[in-house]
Image (spheres, rainbow, N blue to C red):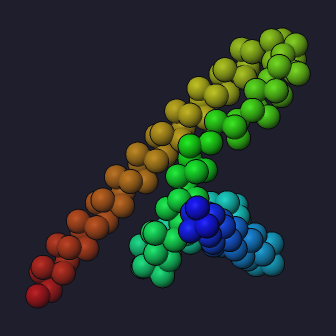
């Protein structure tokens, strides 16, 4: 029991520390990248480089993922509170959601396609130079 509490606490401290440092970086370096996104990138890199062991954060990540629906409760409360406003503006809201989702998908596809082409081009250049 004590071991599980220790793992949860230490994992939470690790995740919190990374997020806190990323908040400071974004604030003081005036980065355009949002702190939560930078935190995820840094966390993924630290995991990939084995600087942070997966065992250290596995328990807290599982706990957070298992309880993720609780994080959406304020969203639904907000929808209920502002139902009248949402109902009056439903069509513009839906158009906005559809357009932004479509634009995001298209831009992501174009960027990924260009990255794949660039990587292939670089491999061809390396083969020709060797």
Relative to 7, residue 101 above or below: above
Relative to 2, residue 74 above or below: above
Q: Quadrant of residue 22?
A: bottom right
Horizontal side of 69 relative to 74 (left or right) equals left
Give the number of callouts: 0
Work out whether residue 68 or residue 120 is closer to the camera in this orientation and state it: 68
Quarter containing the N terminus: bottom right
- The residue shown at (53%, 59%) is 59
Counting from the top left corner in percent of width and height, residue 35 is at 70, 64
Q: Residue furthest front?
A: 1
Quarter containing the C terminus: bottom left
For the question of whether residue 45 can be seen, the reply is no
Counting from the top left corner in percent of width and height, residue 109 is at 41, 45
- The residue shown at (87%, 21%) is 82
Q: Quadrant of residue 81?
A: top right
Work out whether residue 43 or residue 88 is closer to the camera in this orientation and state it: 43
Counting from the top left corner in percent of width and height, residue 17 is at 69, 74
Q: Quadrant of residue 23?
A: bottom right
Horizontal side of 18 relative to 120 (left or right) equals right
Q: Residue furthest bottom?
A: 130
For the question of whether residue 77 can be seen, the reply is yes
- The residue shown at (28%, 60%) is 117
Horizontal side of 47 relative to 12 (left or right) equals left
Work out whether residue 1 or residue 69 is closer to the camera in this orientation and state it: 1
Counting from the top left corner in percent of width and height, residue 58 is at 49, 62
Horizontal side of 83 relative to 103 (left or right) equals right
- The residue shown at (75%, 32%) is 73
């Amino acid at each position: 029991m004590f071991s599980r509490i220790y793992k949860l606490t230490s994992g939470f401290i690790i995740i919190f520390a990374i997020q806190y440092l990323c908040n400071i970086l974004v604030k003081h370096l005036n980065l355009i990248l949002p702190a939560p996104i930078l935190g995820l990138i840094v966390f993924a890199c630290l995991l990939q480089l084995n600087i942070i062991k997966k065992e250290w954060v596995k328990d807290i990540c599982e706990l957070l993922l298992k309880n993720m629906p609780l994080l959406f409760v304020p969203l639904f409360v907000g929808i209920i509170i502002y139902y009248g406003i949402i109902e009056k503006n439903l069509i513009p809201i839906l158009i906005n959601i559809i357009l932004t989702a479509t634009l995001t998908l298209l831009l992501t596809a174009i960027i990924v396609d260009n990255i794949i082409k660039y990587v292939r081009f670089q491999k061809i250049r390396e083969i020709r130079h060797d």
